[in-house]
Amino acid sequence: MTTSTASRLTSPTPPSLLKRLFNHETFLAWLFLLPSLIGFITFYAVPGVRGLYISFTDWDMLSAPKFIGVENYADMFQDKQFWRSLQVTVYYVILNIPLQTILAIGLAVMMDRVTKSNIIRGIFIMPWLLPPVIVALIWLWMLDPTLGFVNNLFQFLGFSRQPFLGSPDQAMPSIALINIWQYTGYTALLFFAGLQTIPKSLYEAAAIDGANERRIFWSITLPLLRPVLVFVLVTTIIGSFQIFDTIAVTTGGGPIDATRVITWYIFEFAFQRFQMGYATAVSVVLFLILIVATVLQMRLLRADESDLA
Amino acid sequence: MSSRTAIFSQSHPRKIKITWGKALSWTAIILTLIIILFPFWWVVRTSLSTQREMLANPESIAPVGLTTVNYARVLGQVDTETAVAAGGSGQQINFWLFLRNSVIVTVLVVVGQTFFSALAAYAFARLKFPFRDKLFFVYLTGLMVPAIVTLIPNYLLIRDLEWDNTYMGIIAPTFLMSPFAVFFLRQFFLGINRELEEAASLDGASKFGIFWRIIIPISGPPLATLAILTFVSTWNTYLWPFLVGKDESVRVLTVALAIFRSQTPQGAPDWTGLMAATIISMIPTLILFLFLGRRVVNNIQFSGFK
């Protein structure tokens, strides 16, 4: 039986693996781990592997899955609707993330200047606490073409009424705005927490050197917020690529295919057309896209380095 | 480095600028607060209005034809005739039932996931066993796999087990653990001073005794934070319970709201009823938030993974 070199160095007489597997503490540890291990194996590990296998099959859930190799992947790359749904998803991410991040940083800096009120911070994260389904319903009503408050306000202010979620051009921007409403306050609080970790002495030193506010923001605040920025961008971009609930409640992928994002495309194939193999193959590709996107961001944002040193 | 007096000599000309900055900041913050809060008022206003009056006065900021009939009908307290007269579709709806289902599902997941994850986290933080760090790394990879990848296989599993349309089916994937919960608690347990545990160990306490009598009681704050996060994410999920729990007997609020919305006629949606149902679905979260809001706000740094 093998033992690692590290334990051979530390203990003069290494106990055999068999012995270590059955000693009292090991036994206890496995007992402590047992429930979580069952959960992990049943609902993470096995489904992960099984999903990969299903993606190489043709399966309508009525007859047994038939192994067809990479055919699902080949079909996918030739399907115009697949590329369209990827395009729609990226469009959503581009509409959502930059605006949300900039607004959040701005709000955090302003809060940091004038208030640390718990009540204000509490109100800021309220939308984040609510189910996306509820937020989508609220805004479906607010943005209603005929009775919605926003259109009444537009009319009152002399603008023309807008179809919002009802038009192919405005549907995706509307959904992006709904999600910006839900998540900006939360993101702002993450940045606000990050701001509290920046040493005040740096600002004092910069003020002594005569740096103006803009200069201070670009050369102190923003670089030192980078760890939070990396965290926020990585998690919000991963989340945005998987947007589903808002679309399920508001547009159902429409009008036409204006909001048929990748998760909606997967949902349609899996649970409306019952093509489990194909749907799973698309979800595997989505997973790969997310990994690439995350690694790229970590590289671009130099996630493992700090400017505070 | 210049002397400290420089700060004071500069402070006077800067003062006006700071005031402007402050005014601008307050304006932006107040504007944000209005944008966040107003939709909530609009939901309240709609839910307390009668359908007919609301259509006649779409611009009124206050409720029009003040009524609680919308709440009564989404809670199944009025007969079909009254409900239809108030704008309902005639479908029998009972949000008490859905509220109960949401509470059952959420409480089970919060208690189960927190407890079992804490057990695992303790083993990873304090016990010695072969492959410990390798296994922990494997758990961490679970943190990176997006839900959509395991969604279809998990759905097929629940279907094969014939657990669809049962509470068991809805809670199964999250009841025994979440990689984030294990990770979060392990990090905290690692930071606990070992002296207490060693003293208890000398007094003859068992490992489980130490876990239950020492570790759990002093881990109140992180356990509470984790429980709140788990509450919010379980209460809020839609797709999973929609796939495995559409049946009314186990249907949770998010699913019920989406179905309610899809059943209301396209031309003239039942907005007053929908908004009353929305309010009812929000109340538990808002109550939790009133009592524990400070903790949520202060622990927000940790919560990004959801």
Image: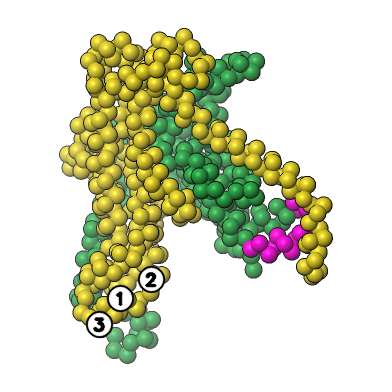
The residue range painted magenta reads A199-215
First in sequence, mark 3 or 2: give its number.
2
| Residue for point 55% across, 32% down | B35
Which chain does tag 3 point to? B
Q: Quadrant of residue B120?
A: bottom left
Q: Amino acid at mark 2?
A: Ile
- Which residue is identified by label 3? B202
SS label for mark 3: helix
Residue B197 is tagged as 1
The alpha-carbon separation of the residues under discs 1 and 3 comes to: 9 Å
User: Magenta stretch containing residue A70, yes or no?
Assistant: no
Which chain does tag 2 point to? B
- Which residue is identified by label 2? B192
First in sequence, mark 2 or 1: give its number.
2
Q: In the image shown, does A235 or A14 lie closer to the viewer?
A: A235
Q: Amino acid at mark 1?
A: Glu
Which chain appears yellow? Answer: B
Q: Position of residue A283 (x, y in %)?
A: 40, 41
For the residues tagged 1 and 3, is the chain the same?
yes
Colour scheme employed for the rendering of this structure: by chain
For the residues tagged 2 and 1, is the chain the same?
yes
For the residues tagged 3 and 2, is the chain the same?
yes
Q: Quadrant of residue B288?
A: top left
